[in-house]
Image (cartoon, rainbow, N blue to C red):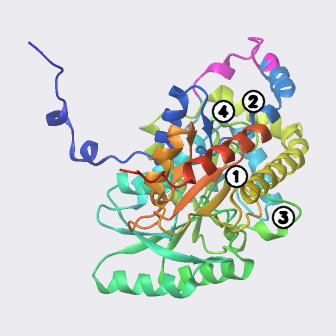
Amino acid sequence: MSGRTSYDRFLSPTGRLLHESAIRRMGTVVARAGDLVSFAPGYPDSALFPWDQLRAITHELLTGADGTVLQYGPTRGYAPLLEALVDVLQARHIKASLDELMITSGSQQGLDLVARVLATPGDVVLVELPTYTGGIAAFRNAQADLVGVVQEEDGISLDDLDEVWQRVRAAGKRAQLLYLVPNFQNPTGRLLALAKRRQVLEWAERRDVLIIEDDPYGALYFEDVASPADTRPIRADDERGRVIYLSTFSKTLAPGFRVGWMVAAPSLIDRFDTAKQSVDLTSGTLDQRVVHLAVRRGVLDALAPRLRDLYRRKRDVMEDALRRQLGDRLTWPAPKGGFFLWVRLPEGCDDVSLLERALEQRLVFVIGSAFYVDGAGHDRIRLSFSAPTPERIEEGVRRLAAALKPAPVSSL
């Protein structure tokens, strides 16, 4: 017997069609590399993780006095954390009762649950052009068809949204889900205008569409250009249960805890709860306990201003370095928050070939086409400034400039 067994014949139809996230693939490249500058994953800066407070909280929890700390917990989540989230949401102008809430293993699990419970194979899910690759993967793995809607300077185009919806309906397909990242969108960094948020909600009511509002970055606004009022969730004005709201502690407290949450109508939460039972039974009980105490003891409230200041300064470092080393060869919409620059490449340059040259320079980023569902985006790349130090950002931009230099012309 020679060679390895091929398992293709064992795969289910779903197993054959699974889509991976381009960002996770880039993360694998980073993990295997040595002196590599990574502008790829949207990782928070670990230097600002509240190590001392988390150490004290875990020491308190792990004394052994309370055996339930390490036991299984309810699928819907640790009750005191859910109660704390009612207050967190109130600060975001969202009124939510406990029967409208559940904990997820990061907001990515929330996307997966929404896709599995609400998307029938062949259904159309409307998404922004471009959109988050994790959303693309979740809905494609549910065998939904993704159709893009163009974005304008202030977010999704309402005219194109309705035209696309009508076109899909005229083709005889269902289009009952709209996936949005309104606050500092991944990958563009754009902020959906407040007026448009209300108009999108009105449109969804008129067209009988559910909105999946993904909000991982709302607390990370840059105070020189944005404020909390600019990030008011669409769900805050939803009086009829039209919006499913997802958020997470990954970008603020620490992603290793894998604690996110969903807000939805009670009947939908019941269905998501049932779907989650077959996936992981419950999100990590210890993780939820740590997050609960971090919220109740004000750790997050104290940390948030420092996070906003740090990421604003890193944005400035990357923008200044790009302008200094590349002049006006690259352009991007100025982000008002979040982790990313969405960069347009010079004419004639494409994302895939540039990434190949960048890897030769020991630099990695995410290609723009990974965020499009229509094959476009080869003239864009996403650069994340959140995790590298300012010094590594400078070095990474130097390597990007080297990768953008034209290849020498052969004299032969």
> Magenta stretch: residue 268 in it?
no
Circle 1 packing at 10 Å, graded few (<14), some (14-19), many (20+), is many
1 or 4: mark nearer the eye: 1
Image quarter of residue 215: bottom right
Badge 3 marks a residue whose secondary structure is helix
Looking at the image, tell me whether mark 3 or mark 1 is earlier in sequence order: 3
- Determine which of the numbered discs, if any, sits on residue 257 in the image: 4
1 or 2: mark nearer the eye: 1
Tags 2 and 4 in contact by the CB under 8 Å rule?
yes
Measure how far apart labels 1 and 4 are at the Cα level. 19 Å
The answer to whether one can see residue 271 in this image is no
Badge 1 marks a residue whose secondary structure is loop
Measure how far apart labels 3 and 2 are at the Cα level. 26 Å
Q: Which residues are magenta?
A: 59-72
Task: Farthest residue to the left: give it.
Answer: 1
Q: Which residue is mark 2?
A: 290
Measure how far apart labels 2 and 4 are at the Cα level. 8 Å
Q: Please name the amino acid that badge 2 sits on.
A: Val
> Residue 336 in the image: x percent, y percent?
77, 64
Task: Give me the residue at 61% from left, 58% from top.
Answer: 186
Image quarter of residue 283: top right
Q: Please name the amino acid that badge 4 sits on.
A: Phe
Q: Which residue is mark 1?
A: 339
Measure how far apart labels 3 and 1 are at the Cα level. 17 Å
Taking the image as shown, residue 307 lies to the left or right of residue 2, namely right
Q: Which residue is mark 3?
A: 228
